[in-house]
Amino acid sequence: MRAVIWFTLLFAVAVVAATSLGTNDGLVSFYAGSRRLDMSLNLFLLLLVGTCFLLVTLIQAVNALTGMPQRAHEWRVARRDRSAQTALRDALAQYFGGRYSRAQVAAQRALAIQIDTPDLKQDNEFTVLGLLLSAGSAHRLQDRSKRDEQLTRALDLARRSPSARSAEEGARLLAAEWALDDRDAERSLQLLAELPPGVARRTHALRLKLQATRLHRQPQEALKTARLLAKHQGFSKVAALSLMRSLAFEALDTARDAEQLRRVWMQFDSADRRDAFVAARAASRFAAFGQADEARSWLRPFWERLSDLSSDERAALASALVDALPGLGAEWLPRLELAAQTYPREAAINHAVGCALSERQLWGKARALLESAAADATLAAPARRRAYLTLAHIAEQEDQTERAASCYKQAAHIV
C-alpha cells in the first residue's frame, strides 16, 4: 500500500514538473564585474534544490558527529539502568521464591548500580523499592538491625520525594507488619496511626490494626476494627460474626467490677447488644458481681422473643438466667412456664425453669423439670450437676434423706 502511494506521488510530481517546467524558457543571469553567466531557469531551480539538500545533509552529519559523545553517554546510562532494573526484578523473584539471602544481594546490587550512576540517582521510587526489598529480606533472615536501618533510609527518602509517596505508604504498612511479627503491638499501632486517613481505612491496614489491638489486649478497639472490616467485606459473614462475638466476650471478661462491666456494655454497638450470646455472657458476668437484678433486666428482652432465636441461643440464655436467679421475682414465672411448655424437649430450658421454680420454692413443679434435664445427656455436665444438686436441696427441704443422698451421689459421678 505504501509503495502505491509513493508511486502516485511520484507520478504527480512528474506531471507537475512537466507542466510547469516543460515550457519554461526563462533565463537566470549572474553578473561578476565584466563577466556574465546565463543559465536556464529550470537548471537554476534544480541546482537550488540540490544545494539545499546538500546543506541539510551536511548539517545533519556535523550534528551527528558532534553529538556522538552525548549519545554514547546516554547509551551507557540506559545500559546501566537496564542492569539495575534486571537486578531489582531478580531480587523480587528471589524474595517471592523464599531465597532471602540472594534477594538481599540482588537488591544491594541494584542500589549499587544506581549509586554509581549519577543520572539514575534521581529515581527515588526505585531506591525506596530496592531498600524495602533489602529490608524485607533482612527481616526474613532475622537481621533486625539491618532491617531497621534500610527501613529508616526508605522512609526518610520517601518522605522527601513526592514521586515516592506511594512507596512510603507501603513502607509504613510493612513496618507495622514486621512489628507484629516481633510481637511489638505498641510499635505497630504507632505506625498505623501515622498513616493518612485514606490508607488507614484500607483492608490490609485494618487487618494489621485488628491483629495489633488483639495483641495489645484492647478488645474494644479490636471490636470496632473488626466491624469496619466486616463492612469492607474483609471477612465472610459467618467468620465476621464469630470474630466479633469472641471479641465482645474478651471485652466483657476484662471488666473487674460491675461499674466497669456496665461501661463496656454501653460502649458496645447496638448489633452486639442484640446478640443473644453476648447478652448471655454479659448477664453471667454481671451476676457474678452480685448484680442479679440488672443481669435479668438484660436477659428479659430475649426471653420475650424466644421463638425468634435458635436452640443454641436459647441454651445460652437459659444458662445465663440460672446464674442470675438470686432474687427472682414472681413476674418471671408466667414467662418461664410458657417457655417450658413451648420447648419441652430442650434440656437447657427445663433446667433453667426448674432452677427458677426452686428459687421460688415451687418444688413440685421444679422437681419434674429438673429430673428431665438431669437425665438428658445432651445437657452440659456442669448444668446436669447443678440440676442434681438442686434436686438434692429440694429433697432435703422435704425431709427425703435417701433421695437427697442419691442425688448427691449422681452429681458426684458427673465429670
Image (tube, grey):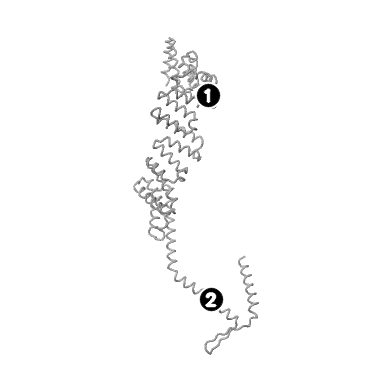
Q: Residues within 10 Å of mark 1 (few under 14, many from 20)?
A: few
- Is mark 1 in CB contact (under 8 Å) with mark 2? no
Name the one closer to the observer, 59 or 402. Answer: 59
Name the one closer to the observer, 6 or 286. Answer: 286
Q: Is residue 317 above or below residue 146?
A: above
Q: Position of residue 128 (x, y in %)?
A: 41, 52
For the N terminus, the quadrant is bottom right
- List the single residue furthest toward the top: 399
Q: Is residue 165 above or below residue 15?
A: above
Q: Is residue 205 left or right of residue 43?
A: left
The numbered mark at residue 345 is none
Q: Give the secondary structure at mark 2.
A: helix
Q: Position of residue 326 (x, y in %)?
A: 43, 19
Q: Position of residue 285 (x, y in %)?
A: 42, 26
Q: Nearer the viewer, mark 1 or mark 2?
A: 1
Name the one closer to the observer, 223 or 45. Answer: 223
Q: Give the secondary structure at mark 1.
A: loop
Which of disc 2 and disc 1 is earlier in sequence?
Answer: 2
- Location of residue 390 by image quarter: top left
Q: Is residue 396 left or right of residue 346?
A: left
Q: CA distance from mark 1 to mark 2?
A: 102 Å
Mark 1 residue type: Glu
| Number of numbered callouts drawn | 2
- List the single residue furthest toward the left: 145
Q: Residues within 10 Å of mark 2 (few under 14, many from 20)?
A: few
Q: Is residue 306 left or right of residue 292?
A: right
Q: Which residue is mark 2?
A: 52
Q: Residue at x 64, y 77 (%)?
A: 20
Residue 374 visible, this orientation: no
Mark 2 residue type: Cys
The numbered mark at residue 304 is 1
